[in-house]
Image: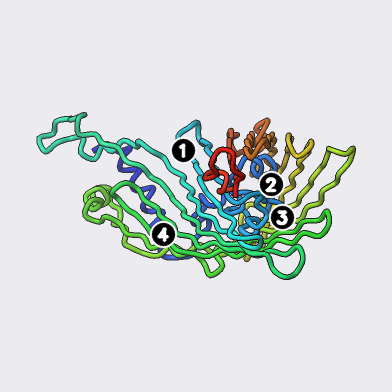
């Protein structure tokens, strides 16, 4: 058995064994990356303005803003030079003028990891044909609902979340949680709030102790035990303003606050109880057809070798096109390598339509 494989397995499961005992920082952190080229190009500052299929992630209340009866969308991005894949797919349906539902899935995973546990057979021979592969992947399934309230401009929404995490045949977990959100529009002003993991999200981990026992005992480590991992609530706030000028031109700006409740993190505003990561996004639009975007977020203090602290932030840019129901968005994050985060290319595509158009016969109007 190769030492590299032993170290990889120990690293993954020793961490999760610790997570099962306390409420850790960064639990289910794959759900904090973000979805949609528009959002990521604006530094995640869209909680108050999201109005498409990506609402299921940023603010479910935004589903009430859908332009047509149904919308489908998808996103793909890669991290760490293509080692990790991050994908989103979703669909939303407008029940009536006041309410909408959505169904979506998020996956973040590393695939084709070599498993060399059986590389050496019982006779001490190296058998490359015994090498297999496995994936370490996190899944989230979101069931969303949104409804307009009698108060003009006010909508509310929420998610039921089902979490699935697995690492090959070595371990897996199931989790369950809730999100609640609201959105309010007043003239050119927009406000939004999304409280994630309202009652905390619980992941129940199950480890294949028989498969891991030999590896952990051979390396002097304790075999991980089944346990519970807790994700504490997170509050996303946003406020934005639209300025229209020169007939077909507009400029939208939004500021966001991402507040975590799992203790002190390396953010711009931090205490022993909560940490706040502010963000700012701009979107310049022409005729609701072409968009140019920019945003900044991820403000951090980076310790240097001389004992001083350097200040970093993550700049992002993006573009978008809307045409006959199709929406294509692109974002390039961390341009210029300003922060310690690696830059990534993000593409997202969506299509909105009225379902009656699918069933209308030639020469007949759609429903």
Q: On the image, numbered disc 3 is attached to which residue?
A: 48
For label 4, count other residues whose C-alpha is less than 10 Å away and answer few (under 14), some (14-19) or many (20+).
some
Q: On the image, numbered disc 4 is attached to which residue?
A: 18
Q: Are marks 3 and 2 in contact (CB under 8 Å)?
A: no
**Mark closer to the chain start, 2 or 1:** 1
**Mark closer to the chain start, 4 or 1:** 4
Taking the view exactly as shown, the residue that stands out farthest to the left is 123
Q: Coloring scheme of the render?
A: rainbow
Q: Residue at x 52, y 48 (%)?
A: 90
Q: On the image, numbered disc 1 is attached to which residue?
A: 84
**SS class of the residue under badge 1?**
strand
Does residue 263 appear in this view?
Answer: no
In the image, 224: left or right of 196? left
Q: Are marks 1 and 3 in contact (CB under 8 Å)?
A: no
**For this rendering, which residue is in front, 258 or 321?**
321
**For this rendering, which residue is in front, 315 or 25?**
315
Q: CA distance from mark 1 to mark 3?
A: 30 Å
Q: Residue at x 66, y 41 (%)?
A: 38
- In the figure, residue 276 lies in which quadrant? bottom right
**Mark closer to the chain start, 1 or 3:** 3
Q: Is residue 311 above or below residue 259?
A: above
């Amino acid at each position: 058995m190769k030492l590299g494989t032993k170290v990889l397995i120990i690293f993954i499961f020793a961490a999760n064994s610790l997570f099962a005992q306390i409420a850790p920082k960064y639990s289910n952190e794959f759900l904090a990356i973000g979805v949609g080229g528009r959002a990521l190009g604006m530094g995640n500052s869209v909680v108050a303005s999201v109005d498409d299929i990506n609402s299921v992630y940023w603010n479910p209340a935004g589903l009430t803003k859908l332009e047509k009866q149904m919308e489908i969308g998808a996103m793909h991005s890669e991290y760490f030079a293509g080692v990790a894949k991050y994908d989103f797919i979703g669909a939303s349906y407008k029940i009536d003028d006041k309410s909408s539902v959505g169904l979506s899935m998020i996956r973040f995973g590393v695939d084709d990891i070599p498993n060399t546990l059986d590389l050496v057979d019982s006779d001490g021979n190296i058998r490359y044909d015994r090498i297999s592969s496995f994936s370490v992947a996190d899944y989230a399934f979101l069931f969303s609902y949104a409804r307009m309230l009698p108060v003009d401009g006010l909508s509310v929404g929420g998610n039921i979340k089902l979490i699935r995490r697995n690492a090959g045949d070595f371990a897996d977990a199931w989790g369950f949680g809730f999100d609640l959100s609201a959105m309010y529009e007043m003239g050119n002003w927009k406000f939004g709030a999304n409280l994630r993991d309202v009652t905390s999200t619980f992941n129940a981990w199950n480890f294949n102790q028989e498969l891991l026992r030999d590896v952990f005992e051979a390396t002097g480590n304790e075999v991980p035990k089944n346990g519970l991992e807790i994700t504490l609530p997170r509050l996303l706030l946003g406020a934005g303003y639209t300025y229209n000028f020169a007939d077909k031109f507009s400029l939208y700006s939004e500021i966001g606050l991402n507040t975590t409740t799992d203790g002190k993190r390396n953010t711009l505003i931090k205490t022993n109880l909560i940490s706040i990561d502010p963000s700012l996004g701009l979107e310049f639009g022409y005729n609701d057809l072409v968009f140019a975007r920019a945003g900044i977020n991820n403000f951090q203090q980076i310790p240097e070798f001389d004992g001083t602290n350097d200040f970093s932030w993550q700049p992002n840019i993006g573009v978008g096109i809307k045409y006959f129901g199709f929406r294509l968005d692109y974002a390039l994050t961390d341009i210029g390598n300003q922060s310690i985060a690696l830059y990534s290319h993000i593409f997202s595509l969506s299509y909105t339509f009225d379902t009656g158009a699918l069933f209308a016969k030639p020469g007949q109007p759609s429903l």
